[in-house]
Amino acid sequence: MPHFLDIHTTAPSDLRAMIDSAHAMKSARKGLPMAAPDQDQPLANRMVALIFEKPSTRTRVSFDVGVRQMGGQTMVLSGSEMQLGHGETIADTARVLSRYVDMIMIRTFEETVLHELAEYASVPVINGLTNRTHPCQIMADIQTYEEHRGPIAGRRVVWSGDGNNVCASFLHAAGQFGFDLVFTGPEALDPEPEFVALARGQGVQVDIIRDPVRAVEGADLVVTDTWVSMHDSQSNRERRHNLLRPYQVNDALMAHAKPDALFMHCLPAHREEEVTNSVMDGPQSVVFDEAENRLHAQKAVMRYCLGV
Ligand code: CP
Ligand code: NVA
């Protein structure tokens, strides 16, 4: 019974099969209304718990719609209204939920909560974002890159800004899918050295370049994310903004990437902070395709977890 906890802990052949399945499921639904069932109903009679300890628009709606399209049912739960971690141990919650549902998706703070849930659940557990990683997002991003530009292997991806949880999953994907990654941002917000070393150990090039203009030269894809993540203290907001302002993705920066480079952002975006309106709404932006592909990629992840 596989969980989907992170990209670096999932076999590359399984990751590739999930991306291919996501493409196929997306094509098969062309022109159908969102509530129309998929032709196959692999989640028929399955119940999926979606637990949120942090806010969400995309993750919540895309998982819910995805389960329904595949014939299953969902239960959306807010962490604060559960006993999770305060009224009872994570392990006991895992044991109990496993008696009611067939799969659990959780968005939480500490990665230890995700891992404990997975250790004690007897049903698959999916990582819907922790402070440290966001693997479902990057599965959708790989699908999005490939539908626009073909295989991502061998490409040059530039992350500009905070070396946060989404950046971490991009680093994991670099090693697993075989693309090079450049991080450009302030030293204080570098990605975790462990994740950089892991990708390098898998034979891909990972460079840290402080000058954003030099960093984006030759980029096939430029990516950024919010300067203040949900788990970051608001008291550091001004300091983070000051550190990250030089790494804003704007037209001047995009002009140094390859002419056919794409722009991605997992959303929610803070327009005119980490990215300008002109880039978000410009011809290189594929941000809403990324959002749509959360649906298709996660359907593939759920099928992989349930083996259906
Ligand atoms: N990108 C993403 O995970 O969005 P939500 O926070 O809206 O789920
Ligand atoms: N880095 C952001 C991603 C939101 C989807 C956060 O953790 O808040």
Image (spheres, rainbow, N blue to C red):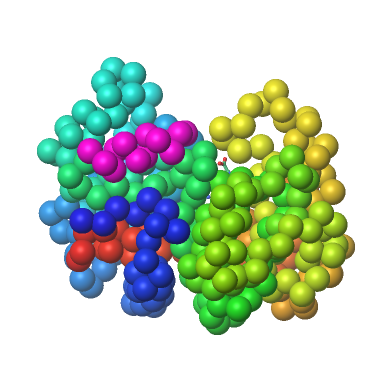
- Judge whether residue 44 can be spotted in this image: yes
Residue at image position (56%, 50%) is 194
Q: Which of 133 and 145 is in front in this view?
A: 133
| Quarter where residue 278 is shown | bottom right
Q: Residue at x 29, y 29 (%)?
A: 90
Query: In the image, 2: left or right of 265?
Result: left
Q: Position of residue 74 (x, y in %)?
A: 25, 45
Magenta stretch bounds = 108-120
The image position of residue 180, as x and y in percent, is 63, 70
Q: In which quarter of the image is residue 182?
A: bottom right
Percent position (x, y) of residue 305?
26, 58
Q: Where is residue 219 in the image (x, y as percent from the top left)?
A: 73, 71
Q: Which residue lies furthest to the bottom in this view?
A: 150
In the image, 273 versus 95, the foreground residue is 95
Observer-nearest residue: 196 or 49? 196
Reply above or below: 100 against 198: above
Residue drawn where x is 73% and y is 65% of the image: 282
Left or right of 118 on screen, residue 284 = right
The quadrant of the rendered image in which ligand 2 is seen is: top right
- In this rendering, the count of numbered labels is 0
